[in-house]
């Protein structure tokens, strides 16, 4: 992984459960730039289990959602040649659980942009454990305007 995580660079004061650096009880994911997307690794804790040895689907959904949202935010920033990302929110997303996600492995997520406009991006995400695809996600993430409750959440 290279450089600084996008969450630390652009939203160091975020309290988001999935990606907020300031949320001490959150997942605090760290996503890094790759060509046409982002990548990250996450080490699940015992408290993230649904049942012994298997990660909870809600935790998996949160990883896919936050990582996908940041992928869109960075892509929209780059497309519009901005110095910082616009705040994006999840308009819709889906999770496909392909196999049980085991505890005891670093989870590796990669995302890429499928389609982009000035204020929104469609993203796909893959989550692997032990080099096996355990879950995939797809989402539409939209930049919010002044007046939306999330508009200033990263600043």
Image: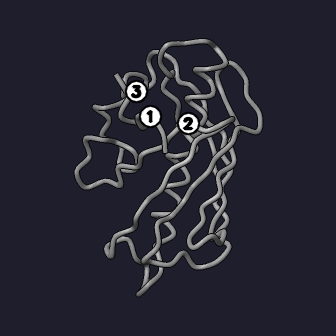
Camera-side mark, 3 or 2: 2
The reply, left or right, for residue 21 in relation to residue 6 is left
Q: Where is residue 89 shown, x and y percent of the image? A: 52, 35
- The reply to whether callout 2 and callout 1 are in contact (CB within 8 Å) is yes
Which residue is the site of mark 3? 10
Q: Residue shown at 51%/18% (left/top)?
A: 145
User: Label 1 belongs to which residue?
Assistant: 3
Which badge, 3 or 2, is on the more N-terminal residue?
Answer: 3
Q: Nearer the viewer, residue 123 or 144?
A: 123
Q: Which residue is mark 2?
A: 33
What number of labels is visible?
Answer: 3
Query: Is 113 drawn above or below residue 125 in the view shown?
Result: above
Residue 106: numbered disc: none
Which image quadrant is residue 108 in?
bottom right
Disc 1 element: loop
Name above or below for residue 64 compared with residue 81: below
The span from disc 1 to disc 3 (Cα, nearest Å) is: 13 Å
Which of the two discs, 2 and 1, labels the residue nearer the N terminus? 1
Snapshot colouring: one colour
Position of the C terminus, as image quadrant, is top left
Task: Give the x, y percent position of residue 20.
Answer: 34, 42
Q: Label 2 to label 1, Cα distance in Å?
A: 8 Å
> In the image, 64: left or right of 44?
right
């Amino acid at each position: 992984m290279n450089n600084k995580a996008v969450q630390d660079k652009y939203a160091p004061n975020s309290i988001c459960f999935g990606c907020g650096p300031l949320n001490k009880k959150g997942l605090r994911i760290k996503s890094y730039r790759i060509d046409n997307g982002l990548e990250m690794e996450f080490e699940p804790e015992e408290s993230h289990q649904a049942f012994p040895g298997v990660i909870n689907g809600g935790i998996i959904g949160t990883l896919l959602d936050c990582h996908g949202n940041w992928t869109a935010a960075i892509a929209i920033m780059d497309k519009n040649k901005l110095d910082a990302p616009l705040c994006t929110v999840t308009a819709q997303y889906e999770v496909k659980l392909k196999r049980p996600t085991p505890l005891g492995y670093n989870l590796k997520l990669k995302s890429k942009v499928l389609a982009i406009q000035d204020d929104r991006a469609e993203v796909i995400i893959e989550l692997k454990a032990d080099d096996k695809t355990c879950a995939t996600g797809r989402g539409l993430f939209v930049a919010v305007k002044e007046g939306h409750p999330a508009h200033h959440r990263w600043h």
